[in-house]
Amino acid sequence: MAKLSLSTAIALIFLLLVAVLIAVVPFLPGYDPYAQNLAAGLLPPGQSSSDGTFYPLGTDTLGRDMLSRLALGGQVSLFIGVSAVAVSLVLGVVLGLIAGFYRGWTESVVMGIADLQLSVPRVLLLIAVAAVMGSGVVKLAILLGVTSWVSYGRIARAMALSLREREFVLAATTLGATASWNIRRHLLPNVLPQMLIVASYELGQIIVLESALSYLGLGVQPPLASWGTMVSDGQTYLELDPWLSVLPSIALFLLVAGIQIASQSFTRENDMTAELAKSGG
Amino acid sequence: MGYFIARRTLQSMLTVLGVVTVTFFLVRLAGDPTSLLLPVEASDEDIARLRTALGLDQSLAVQYAKFLAHTLVGDFGESLRQRSSALGLVLERLPATLELAISAFVLGIAVAFGIGLATRLSRSARLRAAVMWLALARQAIPVFSFGLFLILIFAVWLRWLPSLGRGGIEHLILPALTLATYELALYLRLFNASLSNEQRQDYVRTAYSKGQSRAGVIIRHMLPNALLPLVTIAGINLGLLLGGTVVTETVFSWPGVGRLMVQSVSQRDYPVIIAGVFVVSLIFVAVNLLVDILYGFLDPRVRLA
């Protein structure tokens, strides 16, 4: 158990650092992710500009404060991640439970769509859809959510298949309960804990996906920032000022690793459900 | 076995058809590409003429039927930006992507196999835990961040390797390493988990009680069984690998299909996007089919399902 508590402690420290960055930094004096100071472009961390303003993490090419930009990027990344997970969770649970409870052609259709979606690499699918829909924070969250329901859907369906044969469901049906009542009152509470475990794992994956899309220029658009766009913007100046790319990369690592370790301590060690659920890209 | 293969092949073909259909309708939803093709000052007659030439004045059903007929013979039309066929552009870039994906795949599997087996044979639980922690940490770093770190260290600071473009083996090292280590982490964790799982089986206890050595039990008995899940996951995971190539190609300016597609999206070059989706999903589905058939040979129980 000592190992488990150590890993949980690491996860908590990582997540706490990110939480401070996202939730506390915006209230600090001098927080302004959009203010440009062209006299103070590309400052390394811990330096003041010629006009005396102090930039704890330096500035980007336009002289914007990196700490503020990082906080903004984190808010955007986390907002998109959490909303996308919520969308996919609801969609996956509803579709999965309906498929597993009603069976028949409903099940064939839902699972057919799931198989189809699994047979295209997710990034490819996102690229194709992004090409059509354009991008924006809300659109991006919906897009990521809609393309990620399959993990929940498959597990919810599998659980519904066995739950629908259980005595308490049969008893309710015999007493005249409708299918939708059964799904809401009996199936949903039973699948929810498992679904939340999958969600905790998926959150990290979705944040990485969002940052990758934004890195490719297909996600969040300027002047808004996400950590992915910040890494991409900094790549041009890798030789001059590597901090521009390194700082958002570190932030991403802290958040994703924190979520991953925390979600692992939820799941039993060696339990491969989550691994299997996510494969399919 | 023949029936199994025939059924899975049919399924795969239907999948590709489904993917192409979805992409077609998505692109039609995006609206009229004529506004992108013509200058702003184009007259209404010009627009109408172009719409007729592109077949956009016909009903959606007719357009779809024509599109399918053309797809069957591999005709995705001309790129909207370059005067050459969309499929040709994609196929031109394919060798670069395959070179990157295959080298990363082989590197990832080989190293995961080596490290996984070595740590299992070594008896040291601490070593195994350390390796697993490293793997977990690597998985938490996005592909583009890891690629940039490699560029920063090996190209900018040490100046050992080039950071951009495709050329000799020295150009391949950093992108392949970026992609392989992501795969490696996943394979290592899965391989380790499936070895742990086999270790608890009765046949392992029996082998020990026959007096076989630890290395003998691991290599002769556990390994073949532990490799089965690795084969499936490696196959399924091809999606992740292909997705990873899109990002890796962009990081290293590698002239592959992924980079072409990202560029086509920003230029709204729809024929190239459709052709790219078609080619990549065809490869993906074909490899999965191959893995399924291979799996059917390795594990006869699969065929019954």
Image (tube, rainbow, N blue to C red):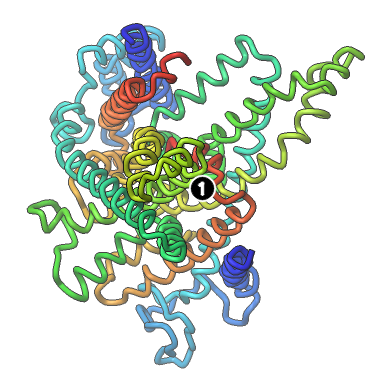
Q: Specify the farthest residue to the right.
A: A175
Q: In front here: B66 or A179?
A: A179
Q: Quadrant of residue A149?
A: top right
The residue at 37%/21% (across/down) is: B24
User: In the rendered image, which quarter contains the N terminus of chain B?
Assistant: top left
Give the image location of residue A114, x and y in percent. 51, 25
Q: Which residue is mark 1?
A: A206
The residue at 26%/27% (across/down) is: B279
Q: Amino acid at mark 1?
A: Ile
Q: Quadrant of residue B276?
A: top left
Location of residue B214 with respect to A179 vertically, above or below: below
The residue at 46%/62% (across/down) is: B125
Label 1 neighbour load within 10 Å: few <14, some 14-19, many 20+: many
Count of number-bearing discs: 1
State left or right for residue B85 relative to residue B105.
left
Element type where label 1 sits in the image: helix
State left or right for residue A196 relative to residue B58.
right
Give the image location of residue B16, x and y in percent. 35, 20
Location of residue A175 with respect to A68 vertically, above or below: above
Residue A126 seen: no
Location of residue A114 with respect to B268 vertically, above or below: above
The residue at 64%/38% (across/down) is: A89
Location of residue B270 with respect to B293 vertically, above or below: below
Give the image location of residue B228, x and y in percent. 38, 34
State left or right for residue B234 relative to residue B153.
right
Q: Quadrant of residue B87?
A: top left
Chain to which mark 1 belongs? A
Residue B282 seen: yes
